[in-house]
Image (tube, rainbow, N blue to C red):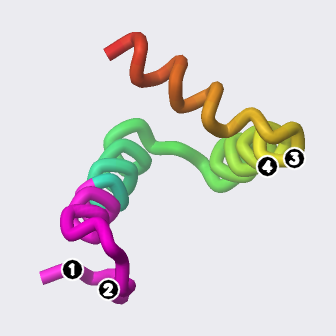
Amino acid sequence: MSAAKTVSTPYPRLNEVFDRLRTTLGNFIRENRISHEEYRHAVAFLTQVGQKNEVSLLFDVFLEVM
């Protein structure tokens, strides 16, 4: 069962995928001992990307690498 609140969406797998992403990111943070300062820098970077409307470009880069 998901720890996150389920949101109504027309895409049935979306909640499942985001729940797995949350779990994976949590494990990554623990395994790599990400500090609060490192986390805040990452959030600031993602905020800047969002403000420049380049979120889709960033995700495209990640997915192309895969």
The magenta region covers: 1-20
Q: Secondary structure at mark 4?
A: helix
Kind of residue at badge 4: Thr
Could you give the CA–CA distance between mark 1 and mark 3, rounded to whole angstroms? 30 Å
Q: Quadrant of the N terminus?
A: bottom left
Could you give the CA–CA distance between mark 3 and mark 2, rounded to whole angstroms? 27 Å
Q: Is residue 28 left or right of residue 35?
A: left
Q: Are marks 1 and 4 in contact (CB under 8 Å)?
A: no
Q: Is residue 14 magenta?
A: yes
Could you give the CA–CA distance between mark 1 and mark 4, rounded to whole angstroms? 26 Å
| Percent of width and height locating residue 6 | 32, 86
Q: Earlier in the sequence, mark 4 or mark 2?
A: 2
Residue tagged 3: 51
Kind of residue at badge 3: Gln
Label disc, if present, on residue 47 of the rendered structure: 4
Q: Are marks 4 and 2 in contact (CB under 8 Å)?
A: no
Residue tagged 2: 6
Q: Nearer the viewer, mark 2 or mark 1?
A: 2
Badge 4: few (under 14), some or many (20 or more) residues near its Cα, within 10 Å?
few
Residue tagged 1: 2
Could you give the CA–CA distance between mark 4 and mark 3, rounded to whole angstroms? 6 Å
Q: Are marks 4 and 3 in contact (CB under 8 Å)?
A: yes
Label disc, if present, on residue 49 of the rendered structure: none
Q: Is residue 27 magenta?
A: no
Could you give the CA–CA distance between mark 4 and mark 2, rounded to whole angstroms? 24 Å
Q: Are marks 2 and 1 in contact (CB under 8 Å)?
A: yes
Q: Secondary structure at mark 1?
A: loop
Residue, x 21% and y 69% (percent of image)? Answer: 12
Residue, x 71% and y 50% (percent of image)? Answer: 43
- Which of the pair 61/43 is nearer the observer? 61
